[in-house]
Amino acid sequence: MSLQSFFVWCEHTVVGTTVRESIWLFPVIEVVHLIGLAVLGGAILLVDLRLLGIGLHGVPVSSLARSARPWLWASLALTIGSGVLLFLSEALKCYENPAFWLKVGFLVVALLFASLVRPRFTRDATAGPLRFGARLAGAISVLLWTGVAAAGRGIGFW
Amino acid sequence: MLVIVQAAEWLEATWLSTAIRESIWVYPIVESVHVLTIAVFLGLTAAMDARLLGAALRETPVGVVMARLLPWIRAGFAVMVVTGLLLFAGTPVRFTTNVFFQIKLALLALAGLNVWLFHHRLFPTVQEWGAAASPPRHARLAGAASLVLWTLALATGRLIAYNWFE
């Protein structure tokens, strides 16, 4: 099965068809997707600003990361879950949409970074300023997630 | 209401409104910035509200959380308001006659009132109650009201794009 025929299959699933044929489902799922974006943004920024030394300084980043972690994964589940529903309803449009592929690329890198690289720097229990590596990790994380969100908004404009 | 519609018609005829409406790039960029600021403004506001509810950052006093996050929340809010006004200026007649926009304005007023009440009634005594892992009832109420009002403002804001009732 080619990639394109997989996207055609996605579009014809019961879920994809239901979302596409409803007047209000797509907008409502979009709202859920945006609420997820807000929570995700908060959970990411709280830790990244601290890594950068311009947020909750004085509070150890390890404590912030522990507090933010359940919100981070819950909001990721919400945005990805609602995002998949939106995708299924217009899979073929996405297949031909460069912004969609850019978003998927950013998302994969951001998820890998958040699960493999950033945790190395968020275990630091010191209350003061952090090493250069930690600040770099915070900056990369902010840029990656901004890329995910900006490319995501771009899907609608393409 | 007629005065408001007339004002909107006047604004729509200005060069600024025409420029925003007819530009290929300005509108998508301004709208994207407006949406992305949700992550900064609403995300950090939600973190602050979660602290007020005792649901996150329980070991850090409320006063410390607010002192560190408020500059970012204010900056995010400023960008949001400016981009929001530009989006409004692009198609003011459509906005003023859109029911979701009207509801959103009412929600923003209520959210603003909640901020004002919090800062004048509760925040001055934050040193006394802010260290508790779970803040007193009024503070939790302010946090919950903030979460609900801003979430509804976000929802109605997104729905302005759909003209179900026009």
Image: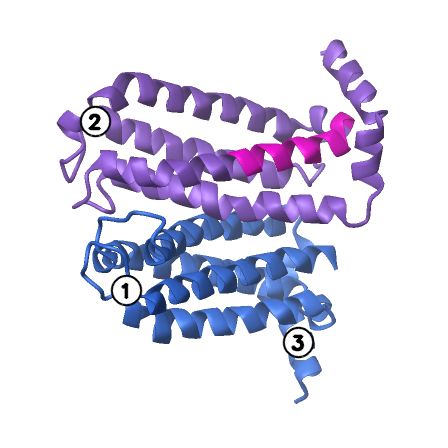
Q: Dot 3 corresponds to which residue?
A: A7
- Left/right of residue B138 with respect to residue A3 in the rendered view: left
Q: Which portion, as a residue range, is magenta?
A: B78-93
Q: Dot 2 corresponds to which residue?
A: B126
Crowding near the residue tagged with mark 2, few <14, some 14–19, many ≥20 C-alpha atoms within 10 Å = some
Which of labels 1 and 3 is toward the front? 1
Answer whether residue B139 is magenta in the image: no
Give residue A122's mark: 1
Residue situated furthest bottom in the rendering = A1
Q: Determine which quarter of the picture holds residue A155.
A: bottom right
Q: Which chain is purple?
A: B
Q: Is residue B11 above or below residue A118?
A: above
Precedes in sequence: disc 1 or disc 3: 3
The overriding secondary structure of the stretch rendered in magenta is: helix
Residue B2 is situated, as x and y percent measured from the top left of the image, at 76, 11
Q: CA distance from mark 3 to mark 2?
A: 54 Å
User: Which element is circle 3 on?
Assistant: helix
User: Which element is circle 1 on?
Assistant: loop
